[in-house]
Image: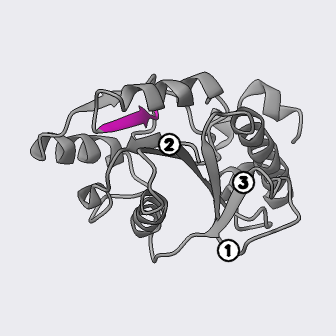
C-alpha cells in the first residue's frame, strides 16, 4: 500500500445536474460534454500518479465508466453539504492508515500531475496544503490528519471559502502551504480554449 492517497470528487455526468452555471449559457447537453472532457483530463493526470486513488461519486457508483476498477477504489460521497462530504471522505481514507491524503475535484483543467506531487511534497513540512482558485475557492486540499474545523460552517460555493479556510488554519496555528492559483471551469468565461471546441 502506498503511504499517499488521492481522493477525487466527481459528479455523475447527468444532464441538468452538472456544470449548471455553464449550462445557463451553453445548454445542458453541451455542459455535460464539457464535464466529460474535464473527467477525462482528471483521469489522464491521475492514472499514473504514485498514490492510491479513490473516486468518490456524487450520486451513484458506476463500475463501468472511464475510471478503471483496477486503479481506482470507488466510493460514494456521504453528507448533506460539500463540507460534510469532504470531511467524511478524508476520515474514511485517513482511517485506512495513509500518511498524506490529498483531495481534488474534477473542475480544474489547469491542474497537472506535477502539482499533485508538489502537494504531497509540501505535506512533508506542513500540516495542510491548499491549491487556491481565482474565484476564492480551492481546487486541492491536502492534510496528514483530519482537521474537522476546515469543513464545518464554511461558506461553500462562495468567494470566501479560501480566506475562511486560511483563517481557520491560522487560528489553529497549523502550518500550511499554498500551491499556484488556478482557474476552475465554472462558467463560459472560464472555459479553456481546448474545451470550447466541444460546444
Q: Circle 2 sits in a helix, a strand or a loop, which is it?
A: loop
* Residue labelled with disc 1: 59
Residue toward you, 48 or 198: 48
User: Which numbered dot is residue 3?
Assistant: 2
Q: Is residue 130 left or right of residue 17?
A: left
Question: Is the Cβ of the residue at disc 1 closer than 8 Å to that at disc 2?
Answer: no
User: Quick one: which residue is furthest to the front in this view?
Assistant: 1
* Residue labelled with disc 3: 72
Q: Is residue 137 left or right of residue 152?
A: right
User: In the rendered structure, which disc, 1 or 2, sits on the residue that comes first in sequence?
Assistant: 2
Stretch in magenta: 128-133
Magenta region includes residue 131: yes
Q: Circle 1 sits in a helix, a strand or a loop, which is it?
A: loop
The 10 Å Cα crowd at callout 3, few under 14, some 14 to 19, many 20 or more, is: some
Image location (x, y in percent) of residue 56:
62, 62
Q: Is residue 65 left or right of residue 9?
A: right
Amino acid at each position: 500500500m502506498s503511504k499517499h492517497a488521492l481522493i477525487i470528487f466527481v459528479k455523475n455526468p447527468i444532464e441538468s445536474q452538472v456544470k449548471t452555471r455553464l449550462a445557463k449559457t451553453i445548454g445542458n447537453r453541451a455542459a455535460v460534454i464539457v464535464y466529460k472532457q474535464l473527467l477525462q483530463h482528471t483521469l489522464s493526470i491521475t492514472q499514473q500518479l504514485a498514490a492510491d486513488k479513490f473516486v468518490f461519486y456524487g450520486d451513484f457508483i458506476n463500475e463501468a465508466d472511464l475510471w478503471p476498477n483496477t486503479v481506482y477504489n470507488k466510493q460514494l460521497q456521504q453528507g448533506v453539504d460539500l463540507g460534510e462530504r469532504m470531511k467524511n471522505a478524508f476520515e474514511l481514507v485517513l482511517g485506512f492508515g495513509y500518511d498524506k491524503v490529498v483531495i481534488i475535484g474534477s473542475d480544474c483543467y489547469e491542474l497537472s500531475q506535477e502539482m499533485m506531487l508538489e502537494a504531497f511534497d509540501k505535506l512533508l513540512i506542513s500540516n495542510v496544503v491548499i491549491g487556491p482558485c481565482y474565484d476564492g475557492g480551492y481546487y486541492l486540499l491536502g492534510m496528514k490528519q483530519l482537521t474537522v474545523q476546515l469543513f464545518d460552517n464554511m461558506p461553500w460555493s462562495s468567494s470566501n471559502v479560501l480566506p475562511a479556510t486560511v483563517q481557520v488554519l491560522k487560528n489553529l496555528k497549523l502550518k500550511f502551504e499554498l500551491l499556484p492559483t488556478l482557474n476552475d471551469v465554472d462558467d463560459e468565461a472560464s472555459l479553456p480554449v481546448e474545451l470550447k471546441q466541444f460546444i
